[in-house]
Every structure is written in C-alpha cells, then in structure tokens.
C-alpha cells in the first residue's frame, strides 16, 4: 500500500471525537491567530496592500478581503 493511500484511509476514518483535546485546542488557536493577523494586516497601508487593493478593484468578484469591503475573483485570491 502506498503512503498516500494509507494516509487518505486514515483521514477518512478519523472522527472529531477521536482527536486529542490538545490537538483541537492547538488548531483553534492557529485559526484564531490566522484570522487575527489577516484582520490586523488589512488595515495596514503597506505598499503590497495598496497594490493588492488596486488590482482587486479592477477585477470585482465574489471573494471579500478580510477586514475590508474590497472584492476579488478566485484568480486574484491570496492566502
């Protein structure tokens, strides 16, 4: 059996109840940290943010910028 197949099967069998509480807490903290950093950075007027906002405004779409009202299509989405 390949490593990828074994990993996929383990993931498919996994249930939320089987996860250790420390893993769940760590994931929650990581998600909150990511959202917090994205929101804090959205207010910054750094050069890259200005360029990104200019690009997004010329290509409207369904995706909304964290912490703002700008929208962009999937092709311009950035993590």
Image (tube, rainbow, N blue to C red):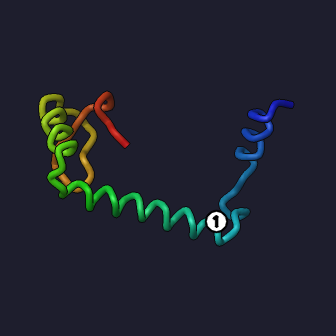
55 to 9, vertically: above or below? above
State the image coordinates of residue 39 (x, y, percent, origin top left).
27, 59
Q: Foreground: 2 or 63? A: 2
The residue lying at 34 percent from left, 60 percent from top is 37
Place residue 78 in its image quadrant: top left
The residue lying at 64 percent from left, 71 percent from top is 22
State the image coordinates of residue 27 (x, y, percent, origin top left).
55, 62
Q: Secondary structure at mark 1?
A: helix
State the image coordinates of residue 66 (x, y, percent, origin top left).
27, 52
Tell me the quadrant of the picture where the N terminus can be found.
Answer: top right
State the image coordinates of residue 7 (x, y, percent, origin top left).
75, 41
The residue lying at 49 percent from left, 67 percent from top is 29
The residue lying at 18 percent from left, 56 percent from top is 44
Tell me the quadrant of the picture where the C terminus can be found.
Answer: top left
Dot 1 surroundings within 10 Å: few (below 14), some, or many (20 or more)?
A: few
Q: Which residue is mark 1?
A: 23
């Amino acid at each position: 059996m390949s490593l990828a197949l074994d990993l996929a099967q383990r993931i498919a069998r996994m249930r939320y109840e089987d996860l250790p509480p420390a893993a769940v807490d760590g994931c929650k903290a990581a998600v909150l940290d990511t959202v917090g950093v994205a929101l804090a950075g959205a207010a910054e007027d750094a050069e890259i943010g200005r360029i990104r906002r200019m690009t997004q405004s010329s290509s409207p779409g369904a995706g909304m910028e964290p912490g703002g009202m700008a929208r962009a299509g999937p092709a311009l989405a950035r993590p």
